[in-house]
Image (cartoon, rainbow, N blue to C red):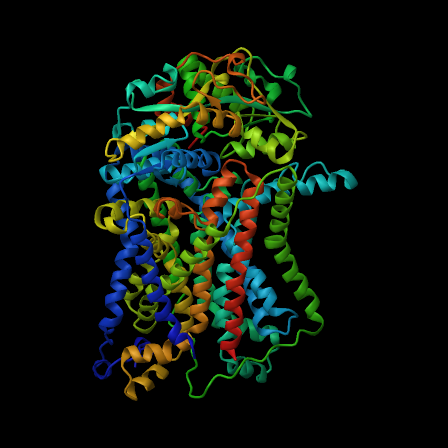
Amino acid sequence: MTTAETQGARFSTATIEAAIRGRKPRPPAILWVPALFVAAAMALPLVYLLIRSLGAGAEFWDLLFRIRTLQILLRSALLVAAVTAASAAIAVPLAWLTTRTDLPFRRTWAVLTSLPLVIPSYVGAFLVVVALGPRGMLQQGLEGPFGVERLPEIYGFPGAMLTLTLLSYPYVLLPVRAALSRMDPSLEEASRSLGYNTWATFRRVTLPLLRPAIAAGALLVALYTLSDFGAVSLLRYETFTWAIYLQYDSTFDRTLAAGLSLVLVFFAVGILLAEYQTRGKARYHRSSSGAARPLERLRLGRWRWPALAFCTTIVILALALPMSILGYWVARGVSAGESIPNLWSATANSLSVSGLAVGASLVAALPVAILAVRFPGRITSLLERTSYIGFALPGIAVALALVFFGVRFATPVYQTTGLLIFAYVVLFLPAGVGALRTSLLQISPRVEEAARSLGRSPLGVLYTITLPLLSSGLLAGGALVFLLTMKELPATLILAPIGFKSLATSIWSASSEAFFAQAAAQALVLILVSSIPMAFLLLRERRLAQ
Amino acid sequence: MRSKRTLPWVFFVGIFLTLGLATACGSSSDTLTIYSGRSESLVDPIIKQFGDATGIKVKVKYANTPQLAATLQEEGSKTPADVFFAQDPGGLGAVEDMLQAIPQEILDQVPNWARSPEGKWVGISGRARVIVYNTDNLTEEDLPDDIRDFTDPKWKGRIGWPPSNASFQTMVTAMRSLWGEEKTRQWLDGVKANKPKEFPKNTPIVAAVASGEIDVGFVNHYYLHRFLAEEGEDFAARNYHPTAGGPGSVIMVAGAGILSTSENRGNAEKFLDFMLSPVAQQYFASQTFEYPLVEGVTVSQLLTPLSEINQPSISMKELADLEGTQKLLRDVGIIP
């Protein structure tokens, strides 16, 4: 049998017959029909950009030449590569420590280390400038006792890389934690019984098994970095997205901006292809019969102290320091007589749209992920890859695409919560697809086949077998979509029902006019409120793992 | 396992809530929909007051001016907006063909320079271009009379500017109009040679001036007053209006226009009228530290009175066209 056949699940006797005759199994309509709808939705921004940029002629090529396109694309590429590598280097050890060892306060670390994802990048970048910039808090603190007059330059590449890494390593952390918590311990045990020590086992067995999860997370980090504007603009590192925003924000020229966004899409396709090359045909589920046992935790012994120091450093840099500065601004503003507005309705709005976005994204991601894993092939891969386009584009481009289509073809839902949730799905679907795909790879198709052979319908198998086994992926994907939606700004501003306020829009409104105390209070609420569902999700993950 | 039951549950609740919210947003006759490029923290109180005073149900979408202009362009004739309240004349100019003429009695409340000559939009409040300077390192005497003199090499490494910012570009437009292309280019080249630090917008410039990272910055006047309100009088930055006038002392307006597709034209006109009433103009003068455009409203004590600013004679129409300015900034290599 070929590899493709061994990987494919057989959903019906017809597909088994197909397999026996040497043909690839065909996916059932219940999978490909919804997946096609999802892919069509995901392609909307691309279609819009094509329509918009049709009007651009010589002027566009002139602009491409003038903005030194190649040069700033290279700068973008450098930043993407550095942030992705650094995020993986932080996230993989964190994930391993918080799932597989007896690290003290394991679950607390797990919640705290995933939270920086919710800090909007322009807030994070502003805090970095305030703390580490020239004449910033660190320098002023060092000037008195040590006479330090200059710190290493934070503007440009170092600041942008630091900020984006600290804000986006959780993209890798969450899928890798999910993969680790469901991994079959027997392989690692076999490795150790054959004489490999812990480190060699991690390097030769665990790490290769984690490859899909790391790649899925790294892809999100790379595309997020590519599409970020907030951090690179405040830290003065000119990237391609920065050039696109400049078109939208200062020239009122949508045509040229759309053309540039298309160039960005080509760049993103390059990243997607590169990631696709790393996939290979390996299998990640147990191949023999038998049931997985709960994982045994490694005793850290003396290594507990460096491990704790590592976790503490990350949490201080990525969470505690930003929160302290925010807290200081609130205190300073309140004592100067600033008032803090009531945040209940913004908080409730943020939570409810984020919850809806999680549900809708997971429902949309499921058929795409199942198709990609169980029926690998050109078309299913293309479907899956299409879902990443929205994530790689500047949020404003996706928002305008949905204005364009919404106002013409979906007038009754235009500027309602419905279209807003749809926009979140278009933007954040890959976070769900990546996590579900990684989890699915760990589930043996034999289990599903057994259920089918015992008379369950395909939908029955999905509900009783696949979804329960997928729970760690559903939780990781749900958590990513939740945190992303909580901080989403451009699409929320443009597409939300008129008068709708979320925490993210309130922070933006206050910070853009230098209402620091208000903005800081809202940012603190955003972080604290997000931590509650995250804690709940991670506790549930523990119950599921047992 | 419970998760098999949660997924459909989440899905149905989602649909239910969506439908509920969608129907709740239905429109009634006595409404007004505003797209505001002006920040909610600044204008929400006075818009609420308009709603309370007239009984009109006002709905506002807040976002930044260029992105709302792009949204209006995408929506075209189907836009739900009645009024576009923009941060600068450039934003209004971008959608001018979507706006309808405003009644003369509303236009006539503001001076000629503060409105569109075609009567498509009207200025609501004024903001001054200023030089913000660090008070630990400089006094007003150290600053030149004319913004022209910042090309002097003694300012090397001490200037901050926001080249992509609309207000900054408007000031450069004023330079082109008052000095001519060539002198503006020389000024841009000269300041560029002084290696100014680049910022994406005004707020971080004011912060950087106060911290001493830079000594002077080219910004709008009201950001300083926000910082003073947050950090108190010790905040180490103040505004300076170049005494010789010129483009460094230009006054710009935030303004509003009525969409030609508006079905609530009467309410929209009431709104503009209210924004130019003494109550609203006093609000802008005392709460957002802006300059009122209507006669007889007193300016906040913290501001330099308009009469003391050597304001150049230039109309907002001349300032609305940013294209030539952006071309110049590109040629000089200041924006990509």
Q: Is residue B95 left or right of residue B238?
A: left
Q: How many marks?
A: 0
Residue B81: image quadrant is top left
Q: Position of residue A291 (x, y in %)?
A: 46, 86
Q: Percent from the top left, x then y, of residue A481?
A: 43, 59
> Which residue is found at the position 60% from the left and 21% from the top?
B155
Quadrant where the image shows the N terminus of chain A: bottom left
Residue A86 in the image: x percent, y percent?
A: 54, 56
Name of the residue lying farthest toward the right: A145
Query: Where residue B5 sits in the image (x, y, percent)?
Result: 38, 75
Height in image: A108 above or below A168? below
| A518 sits to left or right of A387 | right
The reply to whether residue B197 is visible in this rendering is yes
Residue A285, quarter of picture: bottom left
Picture quadrant where residue A439 is located = bottom left
- Please state which of residues A18 and B240 is positioned toward the viewer in this rendering: B240
